[in-house]
Structure formats: structure tokens, C-alpha cells
């Protein structure tokens, strides 16, 4: 057995800061457009096993207790790092040989996703909630597998000069995909019903239409080319057994990262950077309702100006990340997403005011999108070894979810103890530890080292 190298050669580069015109042109590069379309394919399935499915179940008369348990079908999205080494190491029979290491897995996972959505479409929530749960779990598992491959494909296929634009395009298209599978799916079901179809049949055909839209990602994968880094990584492990490749991907993803200078500080920064967003975001909806706004007021603004702010903010984040150094971009994103919380403190003092609500939601979504794009550009820069890109990225995103899932769980108690204006001011303060780590890592040359590598 030939031992694979811990890493493949990396090429030092010096990337000039882009002009505004160059920053716009890069979005039209074929590789960036490929990533954009794959982003749509990644965002599309999420709601089909989540919010859209819950509407279908409620309309079918399923009780609220059962519906609440369906939150568990999203588990594959948080545990996807467990099987990410399989994606890094194993070949899919026929697919890998025909399309390559990443594209083979991508097309294979998308075909499985289409089958899973079609199986879910054939279930009846009123008669067999268990089969609905199994179908939704299959959708979540195949969708999260697609996410693993798309993340690795994006990191490996885009040169450093296109990473920021690619990430901005991916985030924007991901949210469009989610919108299509929520509002778009609901409108489609209503349209089928208006033709005289029974509600059950209308929902079935709505899900069939969503399954057909996954083909956008499949056609994109067929049109793409296999990343050169992936080809080199595959050649480096060609003579290893399947078990050895899986073990190397799983263990190597940890060991290669932890051998880096200041690795533990970088991991802490990954956990804390989006904490300010998560801490406030947990309580945004209860705060708005508690203030006296109606559910429809909140929904209309979030789906309207909120969505527009997210999309514009995503592309603004791409411009910032391309125009400035990685460290400077993180400073901009970190400060903006923290300070934006003060708009909710102002809203708490202003009371029930539609314009104030629209401003607060816009500020939060715009700055959050900027921070997200820059942050994911940073995560991408950390995953530069094509031997285990998928595994490392899945691990880092799981780690980033710690702040959102666990550290934010006490936000309600803080809000109850302090009141809304002070609570959102505290949300600004919780960003300070991440900014201290940012300053320390910058002083240690962490970001300069990342930017010297592709």
C-alpha cells in the first residue's frame, strides 16, 4: 500500500485587490456561474423536508405534537461530517469513472435526491405519518450529501480570485432555492388545486415539480469540469485500498488541521464569529410579536425587504471579500453584524412602527449576509487540502453551528431578565470575544498565511 501524502503542493500567489469593474466581471466567469446554479440546487431541498412539509401535514390534519417531532428529520444536516470522509475517499461505481471524483458523487447524490423527493411525494401525511417521516429523512440525508459535495467542489474548482464571488453567488442562489421550495411550492400547489385536483394530488404534483427542478443542478454538474485539485488528489491515493482512503480522509482531516499554527484559536474563532448573529436571531421573531406586530406584518417584511436585503448583502459581502484582505473583510463583517443589533434596540424604544421594523429587519439581514459570505470565504480558505476538503469543510460548518445551536440557547433567559432594548445591546457585546480572537490571529499572521495559498 502506498501512503498518501498529508497534503498536496500549494502554490504561493499574490492577488491584487480588484477594482469595482473587475469585481462585477468575475461574477460572469463560467466557474462562478456553475457554483451559482449548484447553490440553487443545494437550497432547493431544505424546505421540502422542513417548513413546506409541515404546511402539508397541518393541512392534512396531522396533530401539532407529531408535527413538532418532525424537526428531528433535519438531523442529517448537523451530522453530515460523519459520512463526509466516505465522499472524500470512496468512488461511486460507474459515476466516478465516467465523471470524476467530485462530479461523480455530485450527480449520484442528485439522482438519489430526486428519487427521495418523489418517494416523499407519494406519501399521505393523513394516513401514514411514519412513511412521511422516512421519506423526509431520506430527502434530508441525500440533500446534506449533495451539500458536502457542492462545498468541496466549490472550494476546489474556484481560484482564490473567484472564491468570494463564488461564495456570494452560492449564498444568493441558495436562498432563491429555498424561496422556490417554500413560497414557490405553495403557490404551485394552489395552482394545481385551482385546476380541480384534489388536495392530496395537488401536493403530490407540487413535490414532483420540485424533484424536477433538482435537474438544474444535475445538468450543471454535467456541464462542469472536474476540479484539477480533485484529479491530483485522486491520483495520489489511487493505489490505496478503500478502507485506507476513508481512514486517511477521516484522520487526516483532523491531524492536518491541528498541526497548523494557532489551530485551536482558529477553531474558537469559527465557533464565535457568527455568535452575535445567532444570539439575537434566536429572539427576533418573539421580540417582534411581543412588541405588538402581527404575524402577517413580520412575514410580509421578512419575505419582502428582508429577502431583498439578504440577496443584496450577499453580493456586497462578495465585493468586500474580493476588494479587501481576508482579515480586513472579517473586521468589516464582524463589526457590521454586531452593530446592526442596535437597530432592534431602537425598534424596542420606537414601538409598533412599520418603517422602524422594516429598517431593523433590513439592517439585520443585510449585515448578516455580508458576514456570512465573508465567513464562508474564510472557512473555504481553511480547507485547501483536496485529499479531505469535504470532511474538513463539513467539520468546520458543524463547529460553526455550535454557537447557533447551543451557545444561543440561553438567549431567552437573558432577554427575560434584561428587557428588549438592553438585550439587543448585549448582543453587540457578545461579538467582542470573536473580535479579540480576530485581532490576535491577525497579529500572529494567520490570515496572511492563508492568503498566500490557493
Image (cartoon, rainbow, N blue to C red):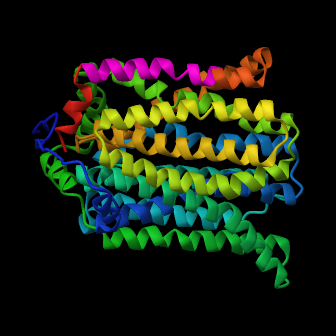
- Image-based side of 200 in relation to 346, left or right: right
As for residue 382 lying within the magenta part, the answer is: no
Q: Is residue 17 left or right of residue 126?
A: left
Residue 185 occupies quadrant: bottom right
Q: Is residue 135 visible?
A: no
Q: Is residue 341 above or below residue 143?
A: above
Q: Position of residue 324 (x, y in %)?
A: 30, 42
**Residue 67 screen position, x and y as percent:** 80, 46
Q: Nearer the viewer, residue 316 or 408?
A: 316
Residue nearest the observer in this picture, 26 or 110: 26
User: Can see residue 51?
Assistant: yes
- Which residue is at 59% across, 52% downward? 309
The image quadrant of residue 53 is bottom right
Q: Residue at x 79, y 30 (%)?
A: 349
Q: What main secondary structure does the magenta stretch of the protein show?
A: helix
Q: Residue at x 67, y 26 (%)?
A: 424
Position of the N terminus, as image quadrant, is top left
Left or right: residue 279 compared with residue 284:
left
Q: Which residues are magenta?
A: 426-443
Residue 431 on the magenta span: yes
Q: Give the position of the C terminus as an image quadrant.
A: top left
The residue sitting at 36% across, 55% down in the picture is 165
Q: Which one is in front, 330 or 117?
A: 330
Residue furthest out toward the bottom: 195
Amino acid at each position: 500500500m502506498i501512503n498518501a501524502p498529508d497534503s498536496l503542493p500549494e502554490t504561493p500567489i499574490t492577488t491584487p485587490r480588484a477594482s469595482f469593474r473587475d469585481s462585477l466581471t468575475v461574477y460572469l466567469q463560467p466557474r462562478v456561474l456553475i457554483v451559482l446554479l449548484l447553490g440553487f440546487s443545494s437550497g432547493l431541498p431544505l424546505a421540502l423536508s422542513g417548513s413546506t412539509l409541515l404546511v402539508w401535514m397541518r393541512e392534512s390534519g396531522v396533530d401539532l405534537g407529531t408535527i413538532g417531532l418532525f424537526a428531528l428529520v433535519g438531523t442529517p444536516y448537523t451530522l453530515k461530517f460523519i459520512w463526509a470522509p466516505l465522499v472524500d475517499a470512496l468512488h461511486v461505481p460507474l459515476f466516478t469513472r465516467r465523471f470524476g471524483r467530485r462530479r461523480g458523487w455530485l450527480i449520484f447524490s442528485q439522482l438519489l435526491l430526486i428519487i427521495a423527493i418523489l418517494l416523499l411525494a407519494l406519501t399521505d401525511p393523513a394516513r401514514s405519518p411514519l412513511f412521511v417521516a422516512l421519506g423526509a429523512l431520506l430527502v434530508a440525508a441525500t440533500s446534506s450529501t449533495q451539500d458536502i459535495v457542492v462545498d468541496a467542489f466549490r472550494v476546489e474548482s474556484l481560484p482564490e480570485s473567484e472564491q468570494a464571488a463564488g461564495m456570494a453567488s452560492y449564498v444568493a442562489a441558495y436562498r432563491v432555492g429555498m424561496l422556490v421550495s417554500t413560497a414557490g411550492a405553495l403557490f404551485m400547489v394552489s395552482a394545481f388545486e385551482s385546476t380541480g385536483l384534489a388536495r392530496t394530488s395537488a401536493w403530490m404534483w407540487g413535490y414532483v415539480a420540485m424533484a424536477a427542478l433538482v435537474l438544474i443542478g444535475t445538468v450543471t454538474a454535467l456541464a462542469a469540469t472536474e476540479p484539477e485539485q480533485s484529479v491530483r488528489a485522486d491520483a495520489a491515493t489511487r493505489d490505496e485500498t478503500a478502507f485506507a482512503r476513508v481512514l486517511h480522509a477521516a484522520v487526516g482531516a483532523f491531524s492536518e488541521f491541528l498541526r497548523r499554527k494557532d489551530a485551536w484559536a482558529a477553531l474558537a474563532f469559527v465557533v464565535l464569529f457568527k455568535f452575535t448573529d445567532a444570539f439575537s436571531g434566536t429572539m427576533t421573531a418573539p421580540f417582534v410579536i411581543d412588541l405588538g406586530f402581527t404575524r402577517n406584518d413580520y412575514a410580509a417584511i421578512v419575505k419582502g425587504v428582508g429577502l431583498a436585503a439578504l440577496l443584496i448583502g450577499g453580493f456586497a459581502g462578495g465585493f468586500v471579500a474580493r476588494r479587501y484582505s481576508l482579515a480586513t473583510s472579517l473586521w468589516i463583517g464582524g463589526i457590521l453584524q454586531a452593530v446592526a443589533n442596535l437597530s432592534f434596540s431602537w425598534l424596542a424604544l420606537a414601538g409598533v412602527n412599520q418603517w422602524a421594523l422594516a429598517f431593523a429587519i433590513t439592517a439585520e439581514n443585510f449585515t448578516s449576509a455580508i458576514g456570512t459570505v465573508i465567513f464562508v470565504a474564510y472557512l473555504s480558505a481553511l480547507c485547501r487540502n483536496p485529499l479531505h476538503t469535504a470532511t474538513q469543510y463539513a467539520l468546520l460548518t458543524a463547529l460553526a453551528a455550535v454557537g447557533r445551536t447551543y451557545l444561543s440557547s440561553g438567549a431567552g433567559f437573558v432577554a427575560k431578565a434584561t428587557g428588549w432594548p438592553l438585550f439587543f445591546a448585549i448582543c453587540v457585546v457578545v461579538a467582542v470575544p470573536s473580535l479579540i480572537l480576530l485581532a490576535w490571529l491577525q497579529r500572529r499572521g494567520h490570515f496572511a498565511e492563508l492568503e498566500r495559498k490557493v
